[in-house]
Image (cartoon, grey):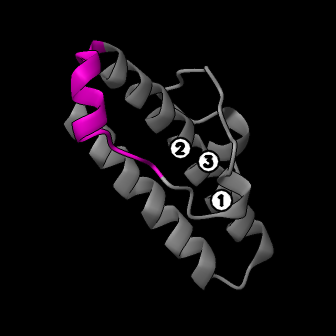
């Protein structure tokens, strides 16, 4: 579970970095939406990880996911999607 969460965090960071480097506004928005999607997955998975921990362990080993983009702040969605919505994947 933790390895998947780490992989998704890396993917999210990769999309955000690519969005910062692109000059095409449409491509930037698509990349940011993909990053937001991975952010939701990470939040849901982190919630599962936290719920399985012993309460006294949380204070010592808690992992904090700090948003790297203003659009990500406060973005909590309980949806657990494992694939992109059609409007993201079918942009051609």
| Distance Cα–Cα, label 2 vs label 1 | 10 Å
Local secondary structure at mark 2:
helix
Question: Given contact means CB atoms under 8 Å apart, are the residues at marks 2 and 3 in contact?
Answer: yes
Q: Position of residue 62 (x, y in %)?
A: 31, 39
The disc label shown at residue 36, or none: 3
Badge 1: residue crowd in 10 Å (few <14, some 14–19, many ≥20): many
Element on which disc 3 rests: helix
Picture quarter with the C terminus: bottom right
Residue 16 image-quadrant placement? bottom right
In the displayed structure image, the side of residue 63 where residue 3 appears, left or right? left
Residue at position x 68%, y 40% in the image: 75
- Give above or below for 70 relative to 49: below
Disc 1 marks which residue? Answer: 32
Taking 82 as reference, is 4 left or right? left
Q: Are marks 1 and 3 in contact (CB under 8 Å)?
A: yes
Q: CA distance from mark 1 to mark 3?
A: 6 Å
13 or 66: nearer the viewer: 66
Check the image and report above or below for 84 versus 11: above
Which of the labelled discs sits on residue 39, or is there none? 2
Q: Is residue 25 above or below residue 62?
A: below
Q: Secondary structure at mark 1?
A: helix
Label 2 neighbourhood size at 10 Å, few (<14), some (14-19), many (20+)? Answer: many
Q: How far apart in space, not on screen, are marks 2 and 3 (Cα)?
A: 5 Å
Disc nearer the start of the sequence (2/1)? 1
Look at 35% across and 57% down and name the residue there. Answer: 10
């Amino acid at each position: 579970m933790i390895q998947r969460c780490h992989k998704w965090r890396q993917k999210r960071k990769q999309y955000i970095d690519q969005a910062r480097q692109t000059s095409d506004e449409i491509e930037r928005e698509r990349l940011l939406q993909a990053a937001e999607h991975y952010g939701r997955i990470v939040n849901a998975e982190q919630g599962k990880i936290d719920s399985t921990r012993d309460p006294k362990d949380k204070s010592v080993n808690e992992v904090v996911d700090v948003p790297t983009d203003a659009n990500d702040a406060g973005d909590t969605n309980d949806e657990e999607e494992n694939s992109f919505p059609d409007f993201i994947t079918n942009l051609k």
